[in-house]
Image (cartoon, rainbow, N blue to C red):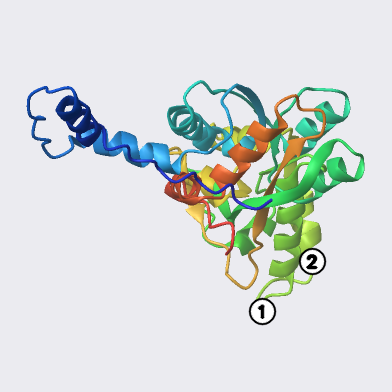
Amino acid sequence: VAPVKSRPAVVIPVLALAAALAACSGGGSSPTAGPPSPLASATSSAATSAPTAAGGELTVYGAASLKGVLDEIRSAYEAAVPGTTLTISTDSSAALATQIEQGAPADVFLSADQANPEKLVDAGLAEGNPVTFARNALVVVVPADNPAAITTPADLARPGVRIVAAGDTVPITKYATQVVANLAAEPGYPADFIAAYTANVVSREHNVKALLAKVELGEGDAGIVYVTDARSSSRVATVEIPDAANVPATYDGVVGGVSPNAAAGRAFLDWLIGPDGQAILAGFGFLPAGS
């Protein structure tokens, strides 16, 4: 989806026009215009960067890892497009895709992977092609006091370590599985690293936020989450994954195929991949869409 170009601001020389009309009617001289106020300048700037689609109600389904950033995006977008109201619903990308398949009225679907939006496109339940709007990386999280003394990802295979993971269809599981396979190929990791890691999994949660919550509560010794999730919590510490073993997570968005407000949905996606949306995502630790 190509970004929607902003309409150029049209500056009407109101004072000059008033002066000309006054002169024609024999009125007095026109007043002297002072410098624009900060508020006027800010309003003009917002007007030139706002999407061109009309406002309205937009229902946005977003991956659980987007929950915090979507709250801020909602405020920013509603300010940029007066008359627009965003209703946000977050859960596992797989669960949201299933809801859309069952008829849930999502105008925009923001997934933590590429597979779920593509699945909706293939089923005729999304309009146009998916758009990459963000990327992420993975990290190991442990409770803040780190009772299992985990210092490297290799410790995830130690006997007795309790690992919290997510369900098989949740995108974080696909990424974490690849990370574990990559780690197993790193020098110094045991030959049975994958099997030992898998044996240590004590629970599988329905989305990444639920996974993170269990680690925060000490109901597990470790888990693999997105960097942005770890950054959002003061109740966990992190153990870095080597760059050679880390896996980039790609977030794609798509407009709902049965959306009654498809034009506004496309405008929202265009805004999200534009400078304003990308700045908010970056503030929460997401990587640029084009990285």
> Which residue type does callout 1 highlight?
Pro
Q: Is residue 231 visible?
A: yes
> Which x, y percent locates residue 150?
54, 55
Q: Residue at x 66, y 79 (%)?
A: 187
Q: Residues within 10 Å of mark 1 (few under 14, many from 20)?
A: few
Vertical comparison of 156 with 144: above or below: below
Return the residue found at the far right: 123
Q: CA distance from mark 1 to mark 2?
A: 13 Å
> Which x, y percent locates residue 242?
57, 69
> Which x, y percent locates residue 46?
38, 38
Q: Residue at x 32, y 34 (%)?
A: 43
Q: Which mark is residue 31?
A: none
Tell which of 136 and 267 is nearer to you: 267
Which of the marked residues, 1 or 2, is nearer the chain's N terminus? 1
For this view, does 141 lie left or right of residue 80? right
> Which residue type does callout 2 highlight?
Asp
Identify residue for label 1: 187
Identify residue for label 2: 192
- The number of callouts visible is 2
Viewport quadrant of the C terminus: bottom right
